[in-house]
Image (spheres, rainbow, N blue to C red):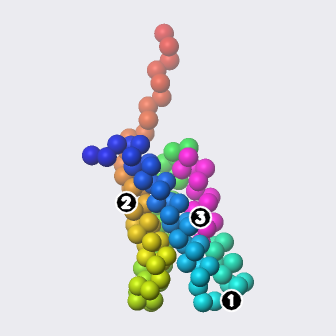
Amino acid sequence: MLTFSTVRRGMWLSHGALLLSALLALALADIGYAARVILAAVAAAPLLLAVPGLRRRQRTTYQWMSVALVIYVGAAAVEVVATLGASVFSGIALFSALAELVLLLQLIREPPARPAAPPE
């Protein structure tokens, strides 16, 4: 069984890899500059908005990010199939989103930390 700290480290690694690969995939896309900037902002916004909640270990952030990651997995899977696997960054985004989804589901299952007992 993986420890809580190992799962959190893996979650942060996959979160960063997903953010970076999604931005790089959009930066190299064959669309206009304005569309690339708008799509990159839309793709990065949920990932960046989740950082404070992930740092504070908020269960609600874990929950809504799990729902958002399903969208990232679907979008990356469609991109990988549409480009016949030629887009390396889309493949990395797909793997990272799947890894983060599994790790977040594991973090959701962890029991909440108990507050420390008051000193007597």
Q: Amino acid at mark 2?
A: Val
| Of the image marks 3 and 2, the number of the one nearer the N terminus | 3
Kindly give the residue lying farthest to the right in the view shown.
34
Residue at the location (50% across, 64% down)?
17
Relative to 29, residue 101 above or below? above
Q: Secondary structure at mark 1?
A: loop
Relative to 114, residue 36 above or below? below
Q: Give the magenta-colored segment's residue range.
A: 43-55
Camera-nearest residue between 106 and 9: 9
Q: Amino acid at mark 3?
A: Pro
Camera-nearest residue between 86 and 76: 86
Q: Is residue 35 left or right of residue 107?
A: right
Pointer 2 residue: 102
x%, y% of residue 59? 48, 48
Judge the density around disc 2: few (<14), some (14-19), many (≥20) Cα neighbours within 10 Å: some
Q: CA distance from mark 3 to mark 2?
A: 18 Å
Q: Main secondary structure of the magenta part?
A: helix
Judge the density around disc 1: few (<14), some (14-19), many (≥20) Cα neighbours within 10 Å: few
Pointer 1 residue: 32
Kindly give the residue lying farthest to the top in the view shown.
120
Q: Amino acid at mark 1?
A: Gly
Q: Secondary structure at mark 3?
A: helix
Camera-nearest residue between 75 and 80: 80
Q: CA distance from mark 1 to mark 2?
A: 34 Å
x%, y% of residue 76? 46, 77
Residue at the location (38% across, 43% down)?
4
On residue 46, which mark appears? Answer: 3
